[in-house]
Amino acid sequence: MGNIVKNFNEFHDLNEAKKITIDVDYACQDSPEECDKWNRQHKVSIEFGKGAQAFVTGSKKDLKRWLEDSGYEDLEELYPEVFEAKATVSKVLLKAIDKHHAAQLGVQKITKEFLSTPKEDVAKREKIKVKLIAANKEAKSAEAEFQATLGKEEADDIEIIW
């Protein structure tokens, strides 16, 4: 279908949309209608630049299929950003992260309540202080569970994107 010259530059990464745009040298040898059909079939969009330059946008999965179907070899070496393995985090780790986060938010909420209570209201502050101590224990327990779960995960299986 299309000829893709072995030239790759990462152009733009849209993390929110889970799509990337790559810059390739592209020359479709078929009719424009056939090229459009080929690109729609592979769920990619192309914006043409100067000469044979093209910006191809799609998910990594769709770009990978588009590149593979173009007939070139050594694509993993030439296009590492498209062919890198997708990182995964286990459901157990996600659950531990959520529990840890919820416990921290609980401590913050109770701390705010404590600080906004007038110093003169000693009885109420004492009740809040007991709740705060319990919430801190829960947060420490959740953090320990998170750390233990994190230690069981393979480092290569975790990708954190800020």
Image: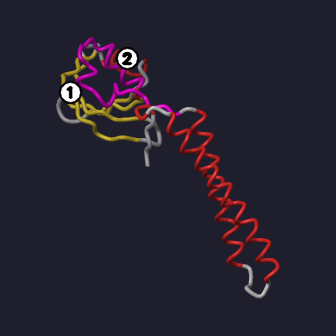
Residue for point 74% across, 79% down: 117
Magenta region = 61-89
Residue for point 19% across, 27% down: 7
141 up-or-down from 59: above or below? below
Q: Along the line of sight, which residue is nearer the eye, 62 or 44?
A: 62
Left or right, residue 84 beside residue 134: left
Circles 1 and 2, Cβ within 8 Å, touching? The answer is: no
Where residue 65 sits in the image (x, y, percent)? Answer: 38, 18
Q: Along the line of sight, which residue is nearer the eye, 6 or 101?
A: 101
The amino acid sitting under disc 1 is Asp
The amino acid sitting under disc 2 is Trp
Crowd tier of the residue under label 1, counting other residues whose Cα lies within 10 Å: few below 14, some 14–19, many 20 or above:
some
Residue for point 27% across, 36% down: 10
Crowd tier of the residue under label 2, counting other residues whose Cα lies within 10 Å: few below 14, some 14–19, many 20 or above:
some
- Disc 1 target residue: 25
Left or right, residue 81 beside residue 128: left
Where residue 22 sits in the image (x, y, percent)? Answer: 30, 33
N-terminal of the two: label 1 or label 2? 1
User: Is residue 69 a member of the stretch shown in magenta?
Assistant: yes
- Disc 2 target residue: 38
**C-alpha separation, residue under disc 1 versus residue under disc 2:** 16 Å
Q: How is the image coloured?
A: secondary structure
Checking the image for residue 148, the label placed there is: none
92 up-or-down from 129: above or below? above
Label 2 SS: helix
